[in-house]
Image (cartoon, rainbow, N blue to C red):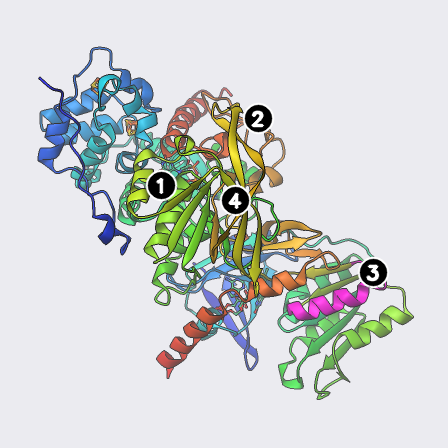
Amino acid sequence: MYKIVDKKRLSDNVVQMVIEAPLIAKSIKPGQFIIIMVYEKGERIPLTVVTSDKEKGLITIVFQEVGKTTKLLGKKEIGEELYAVMGPNGNPFPIKYYGNIVLVAGGVGVAEVVPIAKALKEVGNYITTIVGARTKDLLFFTDVLGSISNKLYITTDDGTYGIKGLVTLPLKELLDNTHIDMVLAVGPTIMMRAVSDLTRGYNVKTYVSLNPIMIDGTGMCGGCRVTVDGKTKFVCVDGPEFDGHLVNFDELMMRQKTYIEQERLALKLLEEKNA
Amino acid sequence: MPRRTRVPMREQNPEDRIKNFDEVALGYSEDEALLEADRCLNCPKPRCIEGCPVGIDIPAFISLIKERKYREAYRKIKERDSLPAITGRVCPQENQCEKTCVLARTGEPVAIGRLERFVADYCVEDIQEIKKDPPNGKRIAVVGSGPAGLTVSADLAKLGYSVTLFEALHLPGGVLTYGIPDFRLPKDIIKREFDYVRALGVEFIPNVVVGKTILLDELLKDYGAVFIGSGAGAPVFLNVPGENLLGIYSANEFLSRINLMRAHRFPEYDTPLRIGKKVLVVGGGNVAMDSARVSRRLGADVTILYRRSREELPARLEEIKRAEEEGINFVFLATPLAFSGNNGWVDTVECQEMELGEPDESGRRSPIPKKGSTFTLKVDTVIIAIGNRPNPIIAKTTQGLEIGRHGEIIVDPITGKTSKVGVFAGGDIVSGSATVIEAMGAGRRSAMAMHKYLTTKVW
Ligand SMILES: Cc1cc2nc3c(=O)[nH]c(=O)nc-3n(C[C@H](O)[C@H](O)[C@H](O)COP(=O)(O)OP(=O)(O)OC[C@H]3O[C@@H](n4cnc5c(N)ncnc54)[C@H](O)[C@@H]3O)c2cc1C
Ligand SMILES: Cc1cc2nc3c(=O)[nH]c(=O)nc-3n(C[C@H](O)[C@H](O)[C@H](O)COP(=O)(O)OP(=O)(O)OC[C@H]3O[C@@H](n4cnc5c(N)ncnc54)[C@H](O)[C@@H]3O)c2cc1C
Ligand code: SF4
Ligand code: SF4
Ligand code: FES
C-alpha cells in the first residue's frame, strides 16, 4: 500500500513524489488534500494532491522540506511505502466561470494551485498567474503554470529573476488597470494576508487556501480551527479555501507557531541522528 | 449474618499512578472473583439483567464462575456482549446492571462489571476456538471501527458474511483508541478484541473516509448492505471570546494527541503537545475526567470546572472518585465567559457563577447564571470537554439519508434501518454521545436485522 513509484527534486528543498493510492486517485478533486503518515510513530500532516491518475491509481504530491516530517518524507525512496495516506479531505474548490481570474502563488503554493488552475482554465476562465519566490533558485513549476495560464508574471524578492519585488507589485498593477473577477492566493500565510489586504480595497472576491496545523483532517479534533467572519471554522471540513477578506490571519499565524519549540527539537534530534 | 460488602479491587496507589499511564484498576484474582461471585443470590427474577443494555444473563455467568467454569462463563457473556474485556472496564455499571441488582436496595450491589472483566481477562486465549458459519457469498460494508462497527463486523462474519470494515483513521477502535486513555483501557485489550474480529475474517481497511474516499452510494453497489457506525466525533466548543488562543484544546484534540498519536512519548513519537503547569478542564463527563487525569499524569495541577454541582456530574462514579484521589480540584457551579491571554497563550479565564434552577428535560436541574457573580482563574492550558456532535461527513455527501436536528442519523430503533434501503446505522451517530455498551447493543440489533434483510430480501 501507498508505494512511492516516482520521486524528483524540484529545487533544493522541494520534492515531487508519485504515490500509489488508487481510491484517492479516483475521488480527489481540485482543492482537496490528503493526510499522510511517513511511519508508524510519525505525525499526521496534510498535503495537497497536485495531479492524479485514475487509471493507474497514482497521486502526485509536491512538498517543501521544512521540518522533521517533511524531511523524513524527502528521504523516502522509490519502492518504499508510506505508513498511511488518507483522503481526499476538505471541500473541492468551487470551479465555475468567473471571467478574469488572477492566481497568486508562492512557496509550494505554486504546486498546490495547479489542479485548481487547470480546472478553472477548462471552464473558460481567463487566467493570469503571479508566481513569487525569494530568489531564482527557489522557482519551480513555472513551466507547468505557464502552460495553463493565459499570462504569467514571476517575481523574486531579490530581483534574480523576473520582476523584483513581492507578488503584490504586479497584482496591484493588474487591479489598477484591468477588471478582475476573482483572485485566488495559495502560499505562505503572510502572502495570502498581503494579497487579501490589497484586494479588499478594490472589492475583488479573494479566495485563500488556509494551512493550519491538523491532526485527523476529518473534523474530529478542532485543532485546525480558524476565525472567518467572526465565526469558528474547521479548515479540514469547512475549507481549505475561504474568503480572504473575512479570515483572521493574525490568529492563524499565531496558531501555526504553537509547537515551534518542539518542532525545532525534533529537527535537531533528526539532524544529529543523520550526522 | 451481616451481609458482606463487595470485594474491593486492587488499584495502583494514587501517588504512583499519577506518574504512569498503566492501568489503575488491577482486576480480581481468582480467589477474589470467587468471593465476590458468592455474593450473588442467583435471583429467580434477576433485576440486574434489565439494567444491562444488551441483556447479559448475569446470574448465569456468575453461577458459572462459582463453579469455576470460566470458559463457559465467558461464552455466556459473549452471547450478548462481543467485547467483555472492554465493557467490564468502562461500562457505567452504577447506572446499569449494578443499579438494578437487588442487593443495591439494601447495600452494595454485586460487582458485576469486575466479574465480567475477570472472566474476560482470564479467558484471554479463548479466541483461538472460533466457530463460524461457512461463507455465504454475501458482502457487507461497515463504516467506522468503534464498538458499534466492531460488533456488527464480528456478528456478521460469524454468520458467514464477507465483511469489509472501513475506518477513517489509521488505527481501529474509534473512541476506545483515540479517546479513552491507556490507564482506563490499555491498548493491548483493544488489540486483542480487534485481533479476534480479524480472526473471524473481517477485512479491515484503514485511512478511508466514507463520504470522501468512497461515497456511501458507491458502497451500496458493491455490498449487499452497509452499516454506518461513524460515531459522534465532532467537538463542541463554548463559543466564547478568546477560545482560539494557544493552549486551548478540545478534549478530542488533547486526547487524540496522547492516545492515538502518543504525544506523551514525544520525541520518540513525532506528534507534539504543549501543556502547562495549571490546567483547567471544562465539563463533567467521562471525557472531562479523562482529560484531567491525563493532564495530571503529565505533571500539571488540574482543576475541573463544571456548571452544575457534584451530584449532577455525568462521569462514572468510580472515575470521579479516582480523579479526586489523584488530587484533581473541582470547581462547581461555574462556566467560562471569556478567555484572555498573553502573547497569544491563554492565561486567564473569566468565569460566571451559576446556581441550579428547575430540572430540565434530562431530569437534571439546569444551571442558570447568578447575576453579577463572576471570578477569574489563572491557567496556562484549557481543555474543553463539553460534548461532541455526530460527524457530518456522511450526512453531507449522501442523498436520501434522513438526518435529525443535531446531525444524527434517523433510524428505526429496533433494527437500525435508515431511510435509505440497504443502509443501517447505530451507536453514537444515531444516539449522540452515549456509551460503549449501547453502541454495541445497537450494532448487535442491526447485525440481526441486516442478516434478516439479506436472507429475505424484504426491507
Ligand atoms: C490543507 C493543507 C495543504 C497543504 N499542502 C501542502 C503541500 O502540498 N505541500 C507542502 O509542502 N506543504 C503543504 N502544507 C503544509 C504542510 O502540511 C506542513 O509543511 C507540514 O505539516 C510540516 O511538517 P514538518 O514536520 O515537516 O514541519 P514542522 O517543523 O513540524 O512544522 C513546520 C511548520 O509547519 C506547520 N505544521 C506543523 N505540523 C503540521 C501539521 N500536522 N499540519 C499542518 N501544518 C503543520 C506549522 O505551521 C509549523 O510551524 C499543507 C497544509 C495544509 C493545512
Ligand atoms: C474520552 C471519552 C471517554 C469515554 N468514556 C466512556 C466510558 O467510560 N464508558 C462508556 O461506556 N462510554 C464512554 N465513552 C463513550 C463511548 O466511547 C462511545 O459512546 C462509543 O465509543 C460509541 O461507539 P461508536 O461505535 O458509535 O463510535 P466511535 O467509537 O466514535 O467510533 C466511530 C469510528 O468511526 C470512524 N469514522 C467516522 N466517520 C467515518 C467515515 N466517514 N468513514 C470511515 N470511518 C469513519 C471514526 O474515526 C471512529 O473510529 C467515552 C467517550 C469519550 C470520547
Ligand atoms: S455489559 Fe455493562 S451493563 Fe451489561 S452486565 Fe456488563 S458491565 Fe453490566
Ligand atoms: S440482581 Fe444481583 S443478586 Fe440478583 S442475580 Fe442479579 S447480580 Fe445476582
Ligand atoms: S484537523 Fe482535526 S478537525 Fe480539522
Mark 3 on the same chain as mark 1: no
Task: Looking at the picture, tell me which residue is in the foreground, A222 or B299.
Answer: B299
- Circle 1: residue type: Val
Instruction: Give me the C-alpha separation between circle 2 and circle 1.
Output: 26 Å
Location of residue A196 in the rendering, given as x and y in whole percent from the top left corner: 75, 64
Residue B198 in sight in this render: no
- B85 over A248 or under it: above or below: above
A199 is within the stretch colored magenta: yes
Instruction: Give me the C-alpha separation between circle 1 and circle 4.
Output: 30 Å
Q: Check residue B419 in the rendering and tell me which mark sits there, or answer none.
A: 2
Front label number (4 vs 2): 4
Mark 1 on the same chain as mark 4: yes
Query: Is the residue marked 4 within 8 Å of ligand 5, measured from its CB?
Result: yes
Crowd rating for badge 3 (residues with CA inside 10 Å; few <14, some 14–19, many 20+) = some
Location of residue B159 in the rendering, given as x and y in whole percent from the top left corner: 33, 29
- Circle 2: residue type: Ser
Location of residue B155 in the rendering, given as x and y in whole percent from the top left corner: 34, 31
Disc 1 target residue: B202
Earlier in the chain: of badge 2 and badge 1, it is 1
- Circle 4: residue type: Pro
Crowd rating for badge 4 (residues with CA inside 10 Å; few <14, some 14–19, many 20+) = many
- Circle 3: residue type: Val
Provide the residue span drawn in magenta.
A187-205
Disc 3 target residue: A204
Q: Chain of mark 1?
A: B
B154 is within the stretch colored magenta: no
Disc 4 target residue: B235
Location of residue B248 in the rendering, given as x and y in whole percent from the top left corner: 51, 54
- A216 over B345 or under it: above or below: above
Instruction: Give me the C-alpha separation between circle 4 and circle 2.
Output: 26 Å
Q: Marks 3 and 2: in contact by CB < 8 Å?
A: no
